[in-house]
Amino acid sequence: GAVVSQHPSRVICKSGTSVKIECRSLDFQATTMFWYRQFPKQSLMLMATSNEGSKATYEQGVEKDKFLINHASLTLSTLTVTSAHPEDSSFYICSASGRSTEAFFGQGTRLTVV
Amino acid sequence: QQQVKQSPQSLIVQKGGISIINCAYENTAFDYFPWYQQFPGKGPALLIAIRPDVSEKKEGRFTISFNKSAKQFSLHIMDSQPGDSATYFCAASKTGTASKLTFGTGTRLQVTL
């Protein structure tokens, strides 16, 4: 299957700072990328959908000013958690999709805000 | 609104046994039903997927059974192995939504020796 690389795999940041998570499709052009959040022992909750070159579409209840998503190219999308607080600590996962319906997931990023 | 219901929440199966996980969906527009396997601290990986035009799909030890009239589908893992111990998610999406998946709640499978 196609490869989606997510970086970093783990990050610890201080409360009030911002952190950026990158999601790259390594061997295909990702016209659409999705960002999920997963709490321990829970399912994946879709945060937003981003299409290359256009603004992201956020799910209800997700603060777009807090979770900034940029999808500037067909191989890269970034999620920036701004002014992070401990309640933002979670496992963030991206997925990428090209022409087919199949979605390929990154390895996830464990964010801990202290 | 939970559009994909998954059961059981957890499952313990002996090595060599059959693991069965069930999902039910509500939205009749869904036409793509994948199953994902997730190990702790990792992203989900696609195991197997099915579309409504077939009632069963088998890949190795993994089989999806699909019942369109009942709006249900299930994952069967034959000859379950300790390495299969993971969390399994069913999902559903509809054509044209570029893989916008609706996930089930997940099933934690433990395969014992």
Image: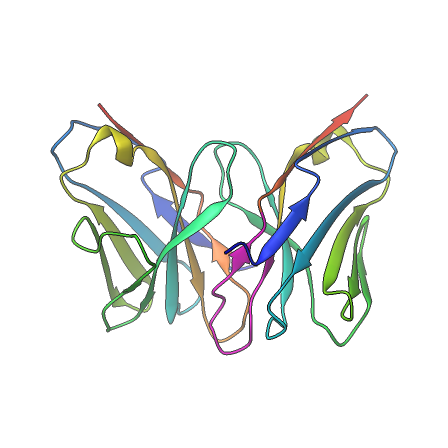
Q: Residue at x 85, y 43 (%)?
A: B78
Toward the front, the furthest residue is B1
Visual colour scheme: rainbow
Q: Between residues A45 and A101, which one lies in front from this camera angle?
A: A45
Q: Which stretch did the figure color magenta? A: B91-104
Q: Position of residue B62 (x, y in %)?
A: 78, 50
Q: Principal SS element in the magenta part?
A: loop
Q: Is residue A95 left or right of residue A20?
A: right
Q: Is residue A110 left or right of residue B23?
A: left
Q: Residue at x 47, y 47 (%)?
A: A44
- Quarter of the picture holding the C terminus of chain B: top right
Q: Position of residue A106 (x, y in %)?
A: 44, 49
Q: Is residue A110 visible?
A: no
Q: Is residue A113 left or right of residue A23?
A: left
Count the numbered circles shown: 0
Q: Residue at x 30, y 32 (%)?
A: A89
Q: Position of residue A35 (x, y in %)?
A: 37, 54
Q: Is residue B83 left or right of residue A106?
A: right
Q: Is residue A40 visible?
A: yes
Rendering quarter of residue B21: top right
Q: Residue at x 59, y 75 (%)?
A: B29
Q: Position of residue B65 (x, y in %)?
A: 80, 59
Is B95 magenta? The answer is yes
Is A48 magenta? The answer is no
Rendering quarter of residue B28: bottom right
**On screen, A54 above or below B34?**
below
